[in-house]
Image (cartoon, coloured by chain):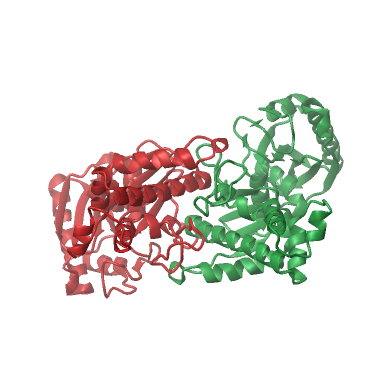
Chain colours: A red, B green
Amino acid sequence: MKDQTTRAAIGIDLGGTAIKAGLVCRDGAVPARQGIATEAGGGVDHVLGRIAGLIGAMRRHAADLGVELEAVGVGMPGTLSHRAGVVFAPPNLPGWRNVPVVERLRAATGMNVVMENDANCAALGEFVCGAGRGVRNLVLLTLGTGIGGGIILDGRLWRGSNENAGEIGHQIVQLDGRPCNCGQRGCLEAYASASQTAARAVEAIRSGQASVLRALVDGGRPLTSEDVVQASQAGDELARRVWEETCRYLAVSCLNIQHGWAPDCIVLAGGMSGAGELLRRPILEAMDKLASKLLGPLPDVRLARLGNDAGFIGAALGVLLEPG
Amino acid sequence: MKDQTTRAAIGIDLGGTAIKAGLVCRDGAVPARQGIATEAGGGVDHVLGRIAGLIGAMRRHAADLGVELEAVGVGMPGTLSHRAGVVFAPPNLPGWRNVPVVERLRAATGMNVVMENDANCAALGEFVCGAGRGVRNLVLLTLGTGIGGGIILDGRLWRGSNENAGEIGHQIVQLDGRPCNCGQRGCLEAYASASQTAARAVEAIRSGQASVLRALVDGGRPLTSEDVVQASQAGDELARRVWEETCRYLAVSCLNIQHGWAPDCIVLAGGMSGAGELLRRPILEAMDKLASKLLGPLPDVRLARLGNDAGFIGAALGVLLEPG
């Protein structure tokens, strides 16, 4: 039997604008990587062809490096079936409907292919070689356009009976609250995603409240959560309130995660986690105010460490940790 | 090796007014049972002595029946450490503080003793031989004075890193909502426990709203959730609104459980689940209105089947399923 560290998998992160690929070892090391444009407009066949090409390139890297390849892991957003290898309607790939990605890529490459939700990939990546290294149980939130969740229990991904576990962004934190894209009201995602943070700022500005961000909104430039964070740091009162509300809702969700799963740590990932301590610190402060002192210590909230590599690293690790 | 069904454990359900005990087989069969008053006023030593006496009686039953005894499982409410065998401050046993129940009962009986939270016991009991028989993953809510939770994942109790997982009653469903006994605001328990359901009815009556329940409240008789259900059935508008709100919050929690764990089923247990379909049906109706159709089917919500036996059956099964 070979040394485990020489075994590796190809990880693919399929996004709406870019496809990232890497050769990933069991310890999370990445001896080779490559990124190309998705060219999503070309349609399903075109994109799958581009992925197959990337897989071919990674196989050549593996051969050059003398690395033994196990399989290919593909991470992508949206509801999908890991078991069936089918993605239903990915939000970032218009026109994709019930695409049997795994079967298609197996046929195209002759390799064993496994598919996984992007938040699950991020959780696996952070668990093995990121913010959750060394723990047994973690819950990860991806804070981006939406809010996704990935759950590692006892060292394994928890998918639930229907493979839809971990939709923490759609846990309701305010009955009859703000409408969510999913159709529910009061979901965490309806308040605290990057896009809804920006949307709440735009709504407050449009309602007539003063803010340095008004010029951007009036100028037609789409507001981002980074704009809100920066304006808040610069002393803008509206931005400060909007950002504080985002962090309070995330604090509620972290407390709910603690009361539910009691993991070793909660990891904040996704684009909005780029705000770093400007995100983590106000969440900790809000938790301290909101939490019961009777129910044990506050959760250990950490920032993700793998950044944009989490997707392909986690996709590959999913294959390496749960072979077959 | 003996046939597994001849192996049994003694289950103890330690409550504030009664101690229930049973000889429980691996399949949940109960060949012998006995209940006595707790006599909590007698203090820790007195109560532990009564439990030791019950254990002795159960051992004699086991000997008479030719049943091989594994150990003793003790179920009780309140925060406790299963690992350390210590109960911290059980709400129904005033004066108990950090009592090493397991060590004391081991010394008194010479038997292996294991302690478990009552909601966890109920979850184990319903999982093995109640409403969750045949599933792999289940979340159970105990609806009583408070709201507890028990979680079975992949056939095993999930306790979390700090043994405090499953505090679903203290998941916040309404930021800045109603104060909870735990010190937080907006917890599920602050709305939808049996006692808070009654409390909300009393508050509405005291605020001047009309209700057939006013006579009870004015007469000084403590209102119960059963009173609210009955009045609601009899057409009382205030009671109907209060009960509907209880069921809506429970519906939110069921959706959040589904989005979080995606179990095979959710089991409603505890005193208030005695309302049966008068509880389950309005929860299903509320979920149907509140849920997103994009996030998969509604959770499978079931009523507990073991009733008052769940405590000692689950305590014993905990020992039999996770020996050592």
Pick out the residue farthest to the top: B107
Instruction: Say which residue appears at 31% left-offset and 55% top-offset.
Output: A194
Quarter the N terminus of chain B occupies: top right
Q: In the rendered image, which quarter is residue B103 located in?
A: top right
Q: In the rendered image, which quarter is residue B302 located in?
A: bottom right
**Residue A238 horizontal/vertical position (percent):** 31, 51
**Residue B52 horizontal/vertical position (percent):** 80, 31
Who is closer to the viewer here, A235 or B302? A235
Asked whether the viewer can see residue B208, the reply is: yes
Who is closer to the viewer here, A318 or A162? A162
Is residue B172 shown above or below A110? above
Who is closer to the viewer here, B235 or B7? B235
Q: In the rendered image, which quarter is residue A80 located in?
A: bottom left
Say whether residue B204 is left or right of residue B37: left
**Residue A250 horizontal/vertical position (percent):** 40, 49
Quarter the C terminus of chain B occupies: top right
Who is closer to the viewer here, B37 or B91? B91
Instruction: Say which residue appears at 63% left-offset and 55% top-offset.
Output: B192
Asked whether the viewer can see residue A320, the reply is: no
**Residue B300 horizontal/vertical position (percent):** 58, 65
| Count of marks placed on residues | 0
Say whether residue A146 is left or right of residue B48: left
Say whether residue A129 is left or right of residue B200: left
Instruction: Say which residue appears at 67% left-offset and 33% top-offset.
Output: B89
